[in-house]
Amino acid sequence: MPKTKDILSKVWLRRGGDGILSRRVCGGTIAEQLPTEQPLITNRQVDMLVRNHLGELRHVEFQASYEPDFAFRMLEYWVYFRRVYSQATTQCVFYIGSGPLRLPAEFVEGGTSHRFEIINLQDYDADQLLASNDWGDNLWALGAHGDRPVVLQALLAKLTFMGSEEQESAFAELTALSGILKIDELLNQKLKEFPMLTVDLEDNAVVRPLIEKGRLEGRQEGRQEQLLTLLSEKFGQLPEWANDQVHRSSAEQLDLWVRRVLRANSLEETLG
């Protein structure tokens, strides 16, 4: 979900990153945003790379689901940043998924070991984040521990006090996170209670494709988690190749496997 996460990283970058979670993830306030492209590794783009007020490099990845070889990818990023900036980089994974955290916090293979920090949004209290004066904290309350419909209603109420430009940007972020958390239908229901909101993102040519992508990515991750749960219940603990195959497959292929698992006698027969 790279494009959706681009939207969410802006809640810290464009506001200077002075909220509770921003300071926690970035190790302080953001002093400088650095380039995120790394063509020398895999031609991927990281989610956030900043220098904080202490001069530390902080690499932040947003993650909403399990991903095979994720820890190895973090090691690749660390090596690249060390080469480019001649400085060790502190890495932090910000887990914003709705399911249980299953990501490893360390890569270990042979004589190589690399650790990074994982901050689970679910460990935070939604009421505490809603009480913050920082919109970023307020937004993340949606994925924190709390009553989600109540949190969503409080967020929409906060939007009504924003100016039109700020409101549109904040609503785009809210919609993107709702797609990742797979609660876009709940958002649509709650919007009916706030007719005073002036945002009309469905007609915004810039924001609309990103919102739709967030919704589709949220549904895709839901299909993946559903299939992995069915496979685990029927065949026991899954090997890495099976996890990898599920996460690399199209929506059509996932739907086919969900139907096939009901009558298949083996994991290989299901995913074959």
Image: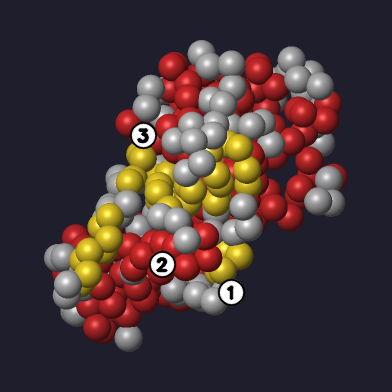
Q: Where's residue 116, x and y in %?
A: 32, 51
Q: State which tag comes first along the sequence, 3 or 1.
A: 1
Question: In this orientation, which residue lies closer to the viewer: 186 or 218?
Answer: 218
Residue at figure coordinates x 49%, y 36% from the top left? 54
Disc 3, disc 1: CB below 8 Å?
Answer: no
Q: Which amino acid type corresponds to the residue marked 1 in the rendered image?
A: Pro
Give SS at disc 3: helix
Density class for disc 2 (Cα within 10 Å; few <14, some 14-19, many ≥20) is some
Q: Residue at x 45, y 56 (%)?
A: 87
Residue 188 in the image: above or below residue 71: above
Separation of residues labelled 1 and 2 (CA atoms): 13 Å
Q: Earlier in the sequence, mark 1 or mark 2?
A: 1
Q: Is residue 162 visible?
A: yes
Where is residue 138 drawn, in percent x and y?
A: 55, 24
Give the label, 3 or 1, closer to the camera: 1
Which residue bears the numbered disc 1? 39
Asked which secondary structure carries label 1, the reply is loop
Which residue position is annotated with label 3?
A: 122
Instruction: Quickly name the residue at label 2.
Output: 79
- Which residue is rendered at x = 37% and y = 27% of the image? 124
Give the CA separation, mark 3 to mark 2.
30 Å
Q: 10 Å neighbourhood of mark 1: few (<14), some, or many (≥20)? A: few
Query: Whole-percent x and y of residue 95?
Result: 40, 45
Q: Quadrant of the rendered structure where residue 162 is?
A: top right
Mark found first going from the N terminus, 3 or 2 = 2
Q: Quadrant of the N terminus?
A: bottom right
Q: Residue furthest front?
A: 86
Report the front residue among 186 and 84.
84
Marks 3/2 in contact by CB < 8 Å: the verdict is: no
Horizontally, residue 82 falls left or right of residue 168, namely left
Question: Looking at numbered disc 3 in the image, what kind of residue is underneath it?
Answer: Gln
Tag 2: residue type? Val
